[in-house]
Image: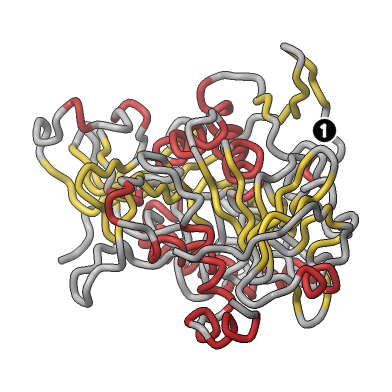
Amino acid sequence: MKRAVKAAEAAELVPDGAVLLIGGFMGVGSPHRLIDALVARGAKDLTVVANDTAMPGHGIGKLVSAGAIAKAVVSHIGLNPETQAKMIAEEMEVELVPQGTLVERIRAGGVGLGGVLTQTGLGTPVEDGKQIVETGGKRYLLEPPIRGDYALIAARQADYVGNLEYSLTAHNFNPVMALAADHVIAEPEHIVPIGVISPDAVKTPGVLVDHMLERRAA
Amino acid sequence: MSTAEIVADAPAVMSPKEIIARRVAQEVEPDSLVNLGIGLPSLVANYLPEEVNVFFQAENGVIGLGARPPEGMEDVNLTDAGGGFVTAVPGAASIDSAMSFGLIRGGHLDMTVLGGLQVDERGYLANWMVPGKMVPGMGGAMDLVSGAKRVVVAMVHTAKGNHKIVPECTLPLTAARRVSLIVTEMAVIEPTEDGLVLRERGPGVSVEDIVAATGATLIVEGDIPEMRLA
């Protein structure tokens, strides 16, 4: 059985300078209460690995606005002019990674693989400084795995084992990120009794989840 | 029919974007899986006959993307890749990002329609950054162009008088892969091993107009028909 913690307690667990994997796609499926709590405690020097930095004032965009992020490893910043401005002003480092490569690098980090061979990025600036591997008569980029100190995961519901079920397009990076960090903090919308979530519906087994936020206040 | 009559006909009231979307719609094969980029490419869905039975993929995690929901019926957990509210059609599947891009890279996606900043004589596309000016990031574009079975570029022919179809891309490439087709309001162009072949003219547009608006060399052979619009 896991004990549900308050968002502020969870934010205290995450030290400044940590590497965070944060779920979400333009804020959909992001752990919003955890993000708010990190902003409230004044977290700083974070490295954030995520699909995007959402928009100013929303989701990961709040961490950008608060100056909490030293480096972002993301696929897209087009809807957040603040991230672009901070990148150009060198207040924030941004590493752009193709979306499919990003999720596979995180998956590799989470499932014990030494890297990913992909053709995505060949012949583009993405290949700069990377090893090219020829196998089966084709050329591939060798992309290194990514791991985080903490994964911040949003889910539709959890049970008290920590099993997670997701909703629609709020899956996105969450199930993969839950594999790839030393500590996993889940933010479910609801917490239900053990047995309510069918084993077939569990996308993230509770053994991966270390901490769980209290359910969202009604 | 003379050119003047064509210009006076229905297509003259169409915006360039509508012409492009209607022409691209004809490229969509029945029973296929299709990814439409955000912006102009997303308009293509408006011009498909209902019987084509296409599943649209949104790379953020749904196969079977449907129209925008009526006001008050939005689900905060159901959006397209641009973050806009959508619905899911009967038979839809929600998927995570690893599955989504597995489908794209793994050759399971029949077609993608993407916008473009530049396309060159090799058929290479640049559409994700203008150094020093605009750095939105590549999002899923590099995976889509590398992995989809067919890549259709849907874009206006020129940008503020500047050529977008050029001898060689000066902007960073999205992929070193020849795209399948370029559709603009002026022309349908097929990149081939020999270069860019002009296949069709836009409504009321002459071959000379197209050549003048194109920075790259076009291969023009025989009569070039005017595009039919869905």
In front here: A184 or B200? Answer: B200
Kindly give the residue lying farthest to the front in the view shown.
B1
Q: For mark 1, name the chain.
A: A
Q: Nearer the viewer, residue A55 or A45?
A: A55
Residue at the image point whose x is 73% and y is 49% from the top = B174
In the image, residue B146 above or below residue A156: above
User: Residue at the location (45% across, 35% down)?
Assistant: A176
**Outermost residue, top side:** A136
At which x and y percent is residue B168?
89, 54
Q: Is residue A129 above or below residue A152?
A: above
The residue at the point 74 percent across, 70 percent down is B134
Instruction: Find disc 1 in the rendering and name its residue.
Output: A130
| Placement of the C terminus of chain B among the 4 image quadrants | bottom left
Q: Secondary structure at mark 1?
A: loop
Q: Amino acid at mark 1?
A: Lys
- Residue B32 in the figure: left or right of residue B201: left
Give whichever of A168, B62 is nearer the camera: B62
In the rendered image, residue B180, in percent from the top left (x then y), is placed at: 66, 44
Q: Identify which residue is drawn at 62% across, 41% down.
A: B143
- Crowding at dot 1, Cα within 10 Å, few <14 / some 14-19 / many 20+, comes out as few
The quadrant in which the N terminus of chain B is found is bottom right
Residue A16 horizontal/vertical position (percent)? 60, 54
Specify whether B224 is left or right of B133: left
Q: Where, by quadrant of the figure, is residue A208 drawn?
A: top left
Q: Would you identify the image quadrant in which residue B182 lies?
A: bottom right
Question: In the rendered image, is residue A148 in sight?
Answer: no
Q: Is residue A85 above or below residue A159?
A: below
Residue B109 visible somewhere in the drawing: yes
